[in-house]
Image: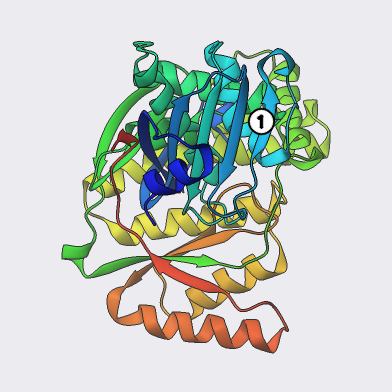
Amino acid sequence: MSITNEFSKLFGHDPEVTAVAPGRVNLLGEHVDFLDGFVLPFAIKDVTTAAIARNNKNSIRIASTQRSETIYEVPLADLEPLTGEPWTRYPIGVIWTLGVKEGLDILIDGKVPLGAGLSSSAALECAVGVALNSLFNLGLTLPELALATQKAENVYVGMPCGIMDQSVSLMAIEGQALLLDCRDLATEQIPFDIAPHDLDLLVIDTQVHHALVDGGYAERRASCEKAVEVLGIPSLREISVEDFVAQKSKMDATTYIRAFHAVTEMRRVLDGVKALKAQDFKTFGELITACHVSLRDNYTISCPELDVAVDTALKFGSLGSRLIGGGYGGSAISLNKKGDTEKIKEEIAKVFAANNFKAPRFFTSLPSSGARLI
């Protein structure tokens, strides 16, 4: 059944507007978007769809095709941060942020895997944002929509995420990775056309599902912000790796190693862009692996399943592999020669079974288009 038919069945009328927005894979630039850093994500083919129409109920009625036709209802008068069921706060937060004052019916069809580090939350927010921007003729630009949907997640949901996920979900172009300057949202499209080079980008979903609305993410962000304060600089992008290391004694050990990740990761992004422009995939792969080592050892957000996936991929020929997303579970990526991908998948599945881990899921994705009306 199409989402239009399901919407009509649930709410008794047709949707006025329908939009889709993709999840993302971040190649480089992990946990630096909230630090005015540089990131290099691309949009995946999996999307979340939002069908929306106005109602005369003075309330938000929202349902998901994945949740057995249950309709959640929140009166417009009750919209305030943390209102609603946990998953409904993402779309309701966008409504609240955009200042919409009319009752709405919303049906969501989410095809971005949940908890896999592929930014299903941003896909949901951006699909709703694009639909509302059209429905109410708000005239918001894509950067303005990115900021609005980020605010929804920061304030309404209570998740202190950066701007990367929403930006790439909205601004992605097929066949390109998005170099995003998170300070001013300046972008550059970077070709990431790996198929002609006989390469695959494998996504390994460990099926360890993380929840980011907890203290771990916020605690690490606070450590990086503490380093900025201690060093007396506008942001961590203002200091070179060498100068940062030279001032190690000014910081406690935890603050230092977490901020060290951020400073070195920003350099890895810019070095990675140079490597892609030169079609130097060997160097690019090495940078991906270096990112994982830093996330594991300095930022301390890996887990046994992610480490096993990465180590096994590298053992069996991967050019570079790392965890992606918030960490503590979710997915890893592996840049492989096409001929090695099946062997890598087989070996990861074997070692997961040997460790009594839940069986992983695998898929590949090439850079896809950003959010749009359908």
Q: Nearer the viewer, residue 260 or 197?
A: 197
55 or 115: which is nearer to us?
A: 55
Q: Is 72 displayed left or right of 267 in the figure? A: right
Q: Residue at x 24, y 59 (%)?
A: 194
Looking at the rendered structure, the number of numbered marks drawn on it comes to 1
Badge 1 is on which residue? 246
107 or 279, which lies in front?
A: 107
Give the farthest residue toward the right. 252
Indicate the quadrant where residue 22 lies. top left
Rendered view: 20 above or below 130? below
Q: Position of residue 52 (x, y in %)?
A: 45, 31
Q: Position of residue 152 (x, y in %)?
A: 60, 23
- At 30% from the left and 73% from the top, the residue drawn is 337
**Front-lying residue, 165 or 152:** 152
Left or right of 246? Residue 344 is: left
| Picture residue at 36% right of the left edge, 70% below the top | 336
Q: Is residue 156 above or below residue 319?
A: above
